[in-house]
Image (cartoon, helix red, strand yellow):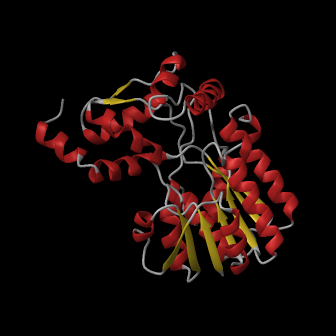
Amino acid sequence: MNIFVAGGTGKIGTPLIPFLLERKLQVTVLTRSEENAKKLPPGARAIIGDLLDTTLLRRELGNYDGLFLNCSGDLEIFQGLNAIDIARRCGTVKHLVYISGQTPTTLYGAAHCGVKYVTERVIKDSGIPYTILQPNTFMQNDEGQRANLNNGTYGLPLGRVGASRIDTRDIAELAAIAFSTPGHAGKSYIIGGPEVLTGAASATVWSQVLGKPIKYIGPDDDMDLFEEAVAKHMPRYFAHDLRIMYEVWGRDGYITSPEDIKELTRLLGRPPRPYLGFVREMAVKWGLLQRSSAGGKE
């Protein structure tokens, strides 16, 4: 299978490429920059461009029988729907794997979540054989907490109910399985991790690994504060959209059922990766273990 990967250099796409290559699949990655293209592993071909470039999509998508579609940001409605429509018109794509989100029907009030539900519907109506992956929130979102952890704090506002956080490598591996083994067409898989973690519980795991106190500072009770902080790094309208999502999680939680975790375990042939293992890996990668050891336990 010759696969066109849209979204191949992010949190899911980066581990996906090696999984596809290991399965002897041909891989072409759409990326926005030459810099990202140079980071691709040997065997992966790069095309510089963007999902908003419909001319590029019309030229390219007729050359592939697999399409991996992972969109993000405020233009996803155009990225995803245009790509699906052009793939349908080309008529060559035999399997589309789309990254949605867990229960987008309950998160429709947040635009970047609600668009997932719309895109799922368009995929199902397109006639293209598909697999829809519906992951929980990513463990890799902790990468944004590195500065906080250096200062002994953790601030991701996961609320007091918690979320079934998933390692993006498990999402990527399941995508590769869907492309390379039969029986996944027309299926939607909810993908969650083995533990329900609040923001405070996540901070506790970091404390355990680093051997020093990590204080949870997530603004669970003051989402105005959260929105103001996020708006310093992205457009205010998107900061407000994230606020809506986190408020739903804070009220209802974002929990994967035991049945769905059992099914994910069957598909992967092993349990999904635990958060503790992820934290240990990141602590070593960022040099936090060395610093905490050198300074002694606090």
Q: Is residue 146 above or below residue 278?
A: above
Name the residue rendered at 82%, 75% in the picture.
91
* Image-quadrant location for residue 39: bottom left
* Image-quadrant location for residue 209: top left
Can I make out residue 207 in this image? no
Q: Is residue 289 above or below residue 12?
A: above
User: Which sits in the foreground, 23 or 32?
Assistant: 32
Q: Is residue 126 left or right of residue 1?
A: right
Q: Is residue 78 left or right of residue 11?
A: right
Q: Is residue 192 above or below residue 26?
A: above
Name the residue rendered at 63%, 36% in the picture.
254
User: Which sits in the foreground, 212 or 140?
Assistant: 140
Can I make out residue 33 in this image? yes
Q: Is residue 4 left or right of residue 213?
A: right
Q: Is residue 114 left or right of residue 164?
A: right
List x then y, in percent, for residue 208: 31, 38
Assign the N terminus to one quadrant of the image: bottom right
Name the residue rendered at 74%, 68% in the picture.
184
User: Which sits in the foreground, 295 or 15?
Assistant: 15
List x then y, in percent, for residue 200: 44, 28
Assign the C terminus to one quadrant of the image: top left
Q: Is residue 101 above or below residue 159?
A: below
List x then y, in percent, for residue 73: 60, 45
